[in-house]
Each structure stands twice: as structure tokens, then as C-alpha cells.
Image (spheres, rainbow, N blue to C red):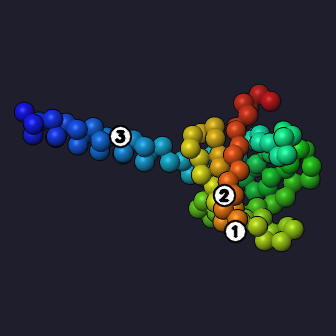
Amino acid sequence: MLNRIVIVSLMAWAGLTSSCASLNIAPAKTLVGQWQTQLGGFPVLMEYTASAVSVDNQAPVTYTLAGDRLSFSEGGQQVRILSFPSKNQMIQLDPMTGTEHRFDRLPESL
């Protein structure tokens, strides 16, 4: 009986970990769209295309994406490490300062 419980528990754990691993979405596919965050208490809208980002409808800035590393060359080389806890949440980590910045995806109708 105890062996059966251990085996069922291990199978459930394996299933959960493999399903979580399958939720890892490629950053290049997930990044495109409109995202909102706050800077200094003010809402900021960012729109990512396949090769550029526009902040609050300003002129777009090009970026490169290599795996989970987002790089901007304008204004000095800047790198952010992307993660997506869900398809509607993005975290950008600044590896120089260790600062995390969180974003929420806006619905496509906006």
C-alpha cells in the first residue's frame, strides 16, 4: 500500500513538472503585443513588434532578442533578461542592478 502511494505521488509530481515545463513559451513569440507597467506611479504603455518597441506612442527603438536576452543599442548597450510567469505577465530583469520590472499584457482590442 505504501509503495503504491509513493508511486502515485511520484507520477503526479512528474506530470506536474512536465506540464509546467511545457508552459515555457518562446520569448520571441510572447513579447509581441502591448504591455503596461508603472514608472514612478504613472502608467506606461509599451508596444513590442517583432523588431522594435515603442513607449507611449513615441518613435520605436529597435531591439535584438537572443533566447531570453533582450538588448537595446540606442542610448548605450542595455540588456534585460525576460521571463514570462504567464502569457499575460512579463518580468524584465536588469542583470547589472538585479532590478525586476513587471509588465501586464493589454487585451488586443486596446
Q: Amino acid at mark 1?
A: Met
Please, what secondary structure does the residue beneath circle 1 have? loop
**CB within 8 Å, label 3 to label 1:** no
Read off the residue under disc 3.
16
Q: Which mark is residue 19?
A: none
Read off the residue under disc 1.
96
Q: Amino acid at mark 2?
A: Leu
Please, what secondary structure does the residue beneath circle 2 have? strand
Read off the residue under disc 2.
93
Please, what secondary structure does the residue beneath circle 3 have? helix
In this rendering, would 72 be left or right of 15?
A: right
Look at 36% across and 45% down and name the residue there. Answer: 17
| Above or below for 80 versus 56 | below
Look at 43% across and 48% down and name the residue there. Answer: 21
> Residue 50's spot in the image, x, y percent?
72, 52
> Residue 109's spot in the image, x, y percent?
77, 28
Residue 28 in sight: no
Sequence-first disc among 3 and 1: 3
Residue 54 in sight: yes
**CB within 8 Å, label 1 to label 2:** no
Sequence-first disc among 3 and 2: 3
| Above or below for 109 versus 64 | above
